Image (cartoon, rainbow, N blue to C red):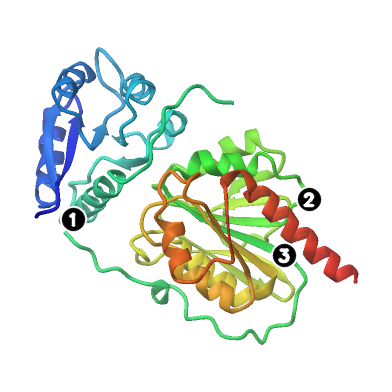
């Protein structure tokens, strides 16, 4: 018996965009475009006949904007929604509102300026639709073509036993994807300024990470910023990897600093958690805590295993609290995870680990 196709509903007021998205998705034999309609009213009528597995939704539309429609969907009948919009930096606040409302992913509209750009954005869209169909979505109310899959070898050599001078500085590295914007907020909002420096890879398009960091910074006691190449890692600060660039932890003497690098996608992502985790294994070893949280795919699993092998502590978010139990599941399956914890406990795990290290030094 053949596997059921993922049924997608496209909602966009541009006939050209609907045609492009439909053509991209129907190239995949595992996806069926159930309908491509011009506005949320037409979408609602179509959904009365049949529910899609995934909705690809624009934001700026006449009669009813996509944000209003998203909130209605998540309040009445939660369905995985991918925001596909031309918004970049100028619309980033609205994009974060979409994540808060329950969107599982956000993608820029496919680029058609070059053949390579079209191929890359098309592959990303098809993969996102298939993975979104497996997302665990819940009702939300107001709150307080196959690409070659590269490994971290493409960016940084495999870690070896470090011969660097030992340091007592503690560091936390987090890898997260789908569902991560709100999950990270839940973690960072409750951390005290006495926490160690935190490096975060959140899968997010270029142009969104700076605004995402500013938003978190306005909500948290700790400082949150987009990471810059060469800057030192300071306690009480969380650093978000820039969209479309890899972030690595490095050492200069006894102090950690950040390296931002270009390069091909690793585990189909740039930035990649595998790259960050490998660099932490190499330069921090047992002074690092690696955490893998909600997300699609398997980015981070191999890197987290490398961290554990070189003495780092490792944690994974549990299935119940994940929007998508993909990345944590893969990390657990390969033996990379010491402890599985709910989202509500991750901040406490960070501080318990940090305090244990300080106690060991005092002894």
Name the residue tied to disc 1: 119
Left or right, residue 64 beside residue 43: right
The quarter holding residue 146 reads bottom left
Whichever of labels 2 and 3 marks the residue nearer the N terminus, that label is 3
Q: Is residue 271 visible?
A: no
Q: Secondary structure at mark 2?
A: loop
Left or right, residue 35 beside residue 341: left
Name the residue tied to disc 2: 194
- Nearer the observer, 74 or 300: 74
Q: Residue furthest right?
A: 363
In whole angstroms, how far apart are the C-alphas of marks 1 and 3?
41 Å
- Nearer the observer, 344 or 92: 344
Whichever of labels 1 and 3 marks the residue nearer the N terminus, that label is 1
Q: Please determine whether, in this image, residue 145 is positioned above or below residue 311.
A: above
- Percent from the top left, x then y, of residue 261? 47, 65
Name the residue tied to disc 3: 170
- Percent from the top left, x then y, of residue 290? 59, 63
Left or right, residue 265 beside residue 7: right
Q: Is residue 24 visible?
A: yes
Q: Secondary structure at mark 3?
A: loop
Whichever of labels 1 and 2 marks the residue nearer the N terminus, that label is 1
Q: Please determine whether, in this image, residue 22 is positioned above or below residue 303.
A: above
């Amino acid at each position: 018996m053949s596997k059921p196709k993922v049924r997608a509903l496209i909602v966009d007021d541009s006939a050209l965009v609907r045609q492009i998205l439909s053509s991209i998705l129907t190239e995949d034999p595992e996806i069926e475009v159930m309908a491509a309609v011009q506005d949320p009213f037409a979408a609602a009528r179509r959904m009365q006949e049949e529910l899609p597995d995934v909705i690809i939704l624009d934001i700026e539309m006449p009669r009813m904007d996509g944000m209003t429609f998203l909130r209605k969907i998540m309040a009445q009948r939660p369905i995985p929604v991918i925001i596909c919009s031309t918004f970049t930096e100028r619309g980033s606040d609205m994009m974060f509102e979409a994540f808060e409302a329950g969107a599982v992913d956000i993608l820029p509209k496919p680029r058609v300026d070059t053949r390579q750009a079209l191929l890359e954005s098309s592959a990303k869209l098809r993969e996102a639709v298939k993975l979104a169909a497996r997302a665990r979505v819940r009702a939300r109310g107001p709150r307080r073509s196959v690409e070659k899959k590269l490994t971290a070898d493409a960016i940084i050599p495999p870690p070896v036993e470090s011969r660097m001078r030992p340091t007592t500085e503690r560091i936390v590295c987090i890898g997260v994807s789908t569902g991560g914007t709100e999950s990270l907020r839940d973690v960072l909002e409750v951390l005290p300024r006495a926490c160690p420096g935190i490096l975060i890879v959140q899968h997010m398009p270029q142009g969104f990470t700076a605004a995402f960091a500013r938003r978190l910074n306005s909500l948290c006691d700790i400082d949150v910023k987009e990471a810059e190449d060469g800057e030192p890692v300071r306690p009480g600060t969380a650093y978000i990897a820039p969209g479309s660039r890899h972030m690595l932890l490095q050492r200069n003497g006894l102090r950690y600093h950040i390296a931002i690098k270009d390069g091909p996608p690793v585990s189909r992502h740039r930035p990649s958690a595998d790259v960050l985790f490998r660099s932490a294994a190499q330069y921090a070893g047992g002074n690092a805590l690696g955490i893998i949280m909600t997300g699609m795919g398997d980015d981070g699993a191999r890197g987290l295993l490398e961290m554990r092998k070189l003495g780092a502590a490792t944690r994974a978010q549990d299935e119940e609290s994940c929007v998508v139990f993909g990345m944590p599941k893969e990390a657990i399956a390969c033996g990379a995870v010491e402890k599985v914890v709910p989202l509500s406990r991750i901040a406490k795990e960070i501080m318990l680990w940090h305090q244990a290290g300080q106690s060991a030094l005092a002894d």
